[in-house]
Image: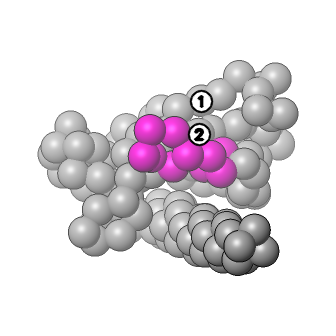
Amino acid sequence: MVRLLAIALFGLWAAGAAWAQDAGSQIRGVISSQVEAFQADDFDTAFSFASPLIQGIFGSPERFGQMVQQGYPMVWRPANVEYTGLTERGGRMFQNVLITDQSGAVHLLEYEMIQTEDGWEINGVQFKRPGALGA
């Protein structure tokens, strides 16, 4: 009986680990696709990766693109993008991303991701303090 329970628990753990790995891959794909769209100045496509909340706040791809160019220039024109920790909090996933800008400065950003009928979408991005790399 104990052995059967252990096997069942291992199966649940393995399924959860596989889901988390798959979700992480999908999330990184969404963020990468948005960054690629920004690099091509394709604000329509970049806007399509934003959640309904973010789309409602900015209203149009053009306004969204202007905000990114002015407030997040390292996302608009990164020199390097590296994915670090992925965590789950309150049903949402948070992906930490190290972005090196064109001048060589490193920025830690936290992407809040939500799952919708259309898949994973970006629900916000915030700067993290430099000492938060271990978080």
Q: Residue at x 65, y 74 (%)?
A: 8
Residue 92's place in the image compared with 25, above or below, is above
Q: Position of residue 55 (x, y in %)?
A: 22, 49
In this rendering, position of residue 99 left or right of residue 116: right
Residue 10's place in the image compared with 110, above or below, is below
Is residue 89 located in the magenta-colored stretch of the structure?
yes
Residue 124's place in the image compared with 114, above or below, is above
Dot 2: what SS?
Answer: strand
What's the amino acid at mark 1?
Phe
Q: Tag on residue 116?
A: none
Q: Position of residue 30 (x, y in %)?
A: 49, 67
Q: Position of residue 9 (x, y in %)?
A: 67, 67
Q: Tag on residue 127?
A: 1
Badge nearest the viewer, 1 or 2: 2
What's the amino acid at mark 2?
Glu
The residue carrying pointer 2 sits among few (fewer than 14), some (14 to 19) or many (20 or more) residues within 10 Å by Cα, namely many
Marks 1,2: beta carbons within 8 A: yes
In this rendering, position of residue 117 left or right of residue 28: left
The reply to whether residue 10 is in sight is no
Quarter of image, res 44: bottom left
Dot 1: what SS?
Answer: strand
Q: Residue at x 38, y 53 (%)?
A: 114
Q: What residue sits right under mark 2 in the picture?
A: 110
Upstream in sequence: badge 1 or badge 2 = 2
Where are the magenta residues, as a range?
86-96
| Quarter containing the N terminus | bottom right
Disc 1 from disc 2: Cα separation: 6 Å
